Amino acid sequence: MTPTIWLLGLSGSGKTTLGSLLRLYLDGQGFDVEFIDADTFCRSNGLSAATPEDRVRNTDALRDYALSLQAQGKLCVVAAATPYESMRQSNRAMLPMYREVWVRCSLQTLVQRDAKGLYAKAERGDLSTLDSVFDAFDEPRSPHSIIDTDRYSLVECYEQLRDLTLDALAQDREWADTGRRMLPQASGPFMNAAIAL
């Protein structure tokens, strides 16, 4: 069974950027990997996040999808806020080889960064759902890793995530990548977005 790497954290913390970099690396190593971004997943499936109940249902749907991909032998990388501890407990109970990664960033830095403009919308009153502003974000109790994107560079954060993933893979199979732990090659708009973590 391949692992599921689940990146959680507040909006703008860097989950999508790091998950995309990890997918590029794993794809380059020949793994059958799928990156699931919660925002894209919810939009494409017509899912709303207006209430806490909606958010629980969305996470249930993400988990079910990841389970179906695992059953096909795919390695899953998920980027989803996953704000409630009950969601994470369900993940731990139901997802084999689950690895929880808290992509942590201070609210002050997120407001300054505001890559999607969500915090500005919340301040203007144009947005009614945003973790840590209008809704709770429970501090993760037992993540496998914490990546502080407001303290470390993009490369350092990526390397921490990559190494956790490779350690999980090593537990699953006799797989080593001596000399191949490097940043994936990326260019164009993606690299610009990655640099802007």
Image (cartoon, rainbow, N blue to C red):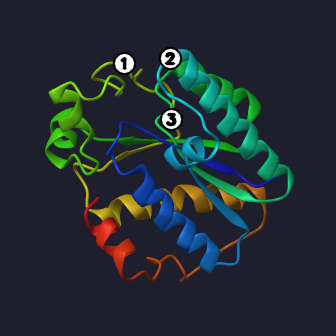
The answer to whether residue 108 is seen in the rendering is yes
Secondary structure under the numbered disc 1 in the rendered image: loop
What amino acid is at disc 3? Answer: Pro
Distance (Cα) linking label 2 and label 3: 22 Å
What amino acid is at disc 2? Answer: Pro
- Circle 2/circle 3 CB separation < 8 Å: no
- Circle 2/circle 1 CB separation < 8 Å: yes
Q: Residue at horizontal 19%, vertical 49%? A: 113
Q: Nearer the viewer, residue 123 or 151?
A: 123
Where is residue 167? Give x, y as percent: 61, 58
Q: Residue at horizontal 47%, vertical 67%? A: 21
Secondary structure under the numbered disc 2 in the rendered image: helix
Extreme-right residue of the structure: 71
Q: Residues within 10 Å of mark 2 (few under 14, many from 20)?
A: some
Q: Residues within 10 Å of mark 1 (few under 14, many from 20)?
A: some
Using the image, determine if residue 10 lies above or below residue 159. above
Q: Which mark is residue 52?
A: 2
Q: Residue at horizontal 64%, vertical 25%? A: 57
Q: Residue at horizontal 22%, vertical 50%? A: 151
Q: Which residue is mark 3?
A: 143
What amino acid is at disc 1? Answer: Asp
Q: Residues within 10 Å of mark 3 (few under 14, many from 20)?
A: some
Distance (Cα) linking label 2 and label 1: 8 Å
Q: Nearer the viewer, residue 41 or 148?
A: 41
Relative side of 10 to 170, left or right: left
Among the two numbered marks 3 and 1 on one chain, the one whose residue lies closer to the N terminus:
1
Q: Which mark is residue 161?
A: none
Where is residue 79? Give x, y as percent: 51, 47
Q: Which mark is residue 135?
A: 1
Distance (Cα) linking label 3 and label 1: 21 Å
